[in-house]
């Protein structure tokens, strides 16, 4: 059975960096698979582009939790899954999917990682990345402008009307479920070392058990 690690935190907090640092710590990358919760946004391809652009993607209702739960359960049972691919420019799912093979370690990262109780119960290690709001905002501006083709005006409007209220109401309250809170995300090398050490011990115990 794989080890499930959940990483939550606000948009731009450094969740992805933490996940990548965990993966890079192991020489055999196939042992670690990263699942981005953003891939599981509900498919809104039946709506107009204007309607999709106005949709709030920072609330729990934006996530296809039934599909996420099913695919996590399949991975826990060592079954491959076809993970959705989300297009952030058109706000819709692509026709193609990404094949995710079973792995020793499954890392789930996203702002709503701890929101759903059934998903939360599957996680063996729960990490919350706690980063100052101004840093998160600057990172989000850079990401959305460089990677998603958004204008500064659009980013600002969405942040104040959707992102900030959602963090206050839905994301930050889930910090209480975390086993470990990491200030400043991927820049916190001490916290990353602790997590990697924990995983290494788990992998070693698993290898020993398989030889018995």
Image (spheres, helix red, strand yellow):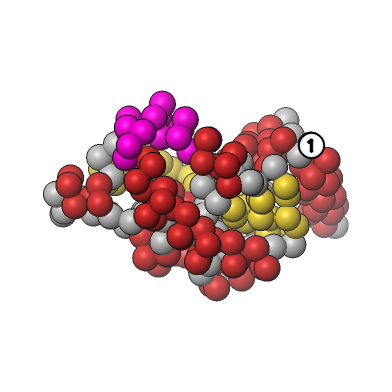
| Quadrant containing the C terminus in the rendered view | bottom right
What is the secondary structure assignment of the residue under circle 1? helix
Image coordinates of residue 87 in percent, x first then y, are 32, 40
Circle 1 Cα neighbour tier, 10 Å, few/some/many (<14 / 14–19 / ≥20): some
Q: Is residue 196 left or right of residue 88?
A: right
Residue 140 painted magenta: yes
Residue 95 located left or right of residue 171? left
User: Foreground residue, 13 or 64?
Assistant: 13
- Quarter of the picture holding the N terminus: bottom right
In this orientation, which residue lies closer to the viewer: 42 or 198? Answer: 42
Left or right of residue 60, residue 196 in this image:
right
Dominant SS in magenta: helix
Query: Going 72% across and 30% down the picture, which residue do you hit?
Result: 27
Residues rendered magenta in the picture: 139-154
Look at the image and say whether residue 190 sits in the magenta stretch: no
Image quadrant assignment for residue 197: top right
- Horizontal side, residue 113 vs residue 149: left or right: right
The image shows residue 118 at horizontal and vertical percentages of: 54, 72
Residue pictured at 17% horizontal, 47% vertical: 50
Rendered residue at 69%/63% (across/down): 178
Can residue 81 be seen from the camera position used here? no
Would you identify the image quadrant in which residue 189 lies?
A: top right
Residue 74 in the image: x percent, y percent?
Answer: 50, 60
The residue that disc 1 covers is 189
Q: Residue furthest top?
A: 146
């Amino acid at each position: 059975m794989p080890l499930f690690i959940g990483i939550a935190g606000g948009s731009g907090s450094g969740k992805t960096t933490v996940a990548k640092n965990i993966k890079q710590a192991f020489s055999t990358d196939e042992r670690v698979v990263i699942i981005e919760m953003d891939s599981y946004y509900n498919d809104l391809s039946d709506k107009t582009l204007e309607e999709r652009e106005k949709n709030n993607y920072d609330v729990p209702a934006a996530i296809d939790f039934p599909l996420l739960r099913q695919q996590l359960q399949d991975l826990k049972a060592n079954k491959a899954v076809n993970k959705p691919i989300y297009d952030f420019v058109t706000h819709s799912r692509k026709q193609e999917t990404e094949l995710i093979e079973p792995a020793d370690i499954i890392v789930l990262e996203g702002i709503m990682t701890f929101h759903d109780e059934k998903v939360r119960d599957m996680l063996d290690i729960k990490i919350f990345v706690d980063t100052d709001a101004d840093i998160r905002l600057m990172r989000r501006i850079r990401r959305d402008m460089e990677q998603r083709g958004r204008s500064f005006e659009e980013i600002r409007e969405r942040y104040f009307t959707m992102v900030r209220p959602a963090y206050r109401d839905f994301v930050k309250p889930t910090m209480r479920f975390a086993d470990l809170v990491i200030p400043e995300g991927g820049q916190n090398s001490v916290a990353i070392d602790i997590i990697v050490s924990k995983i290494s011990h788990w992998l070693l115990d698993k290898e020993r058990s398989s030889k018995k």
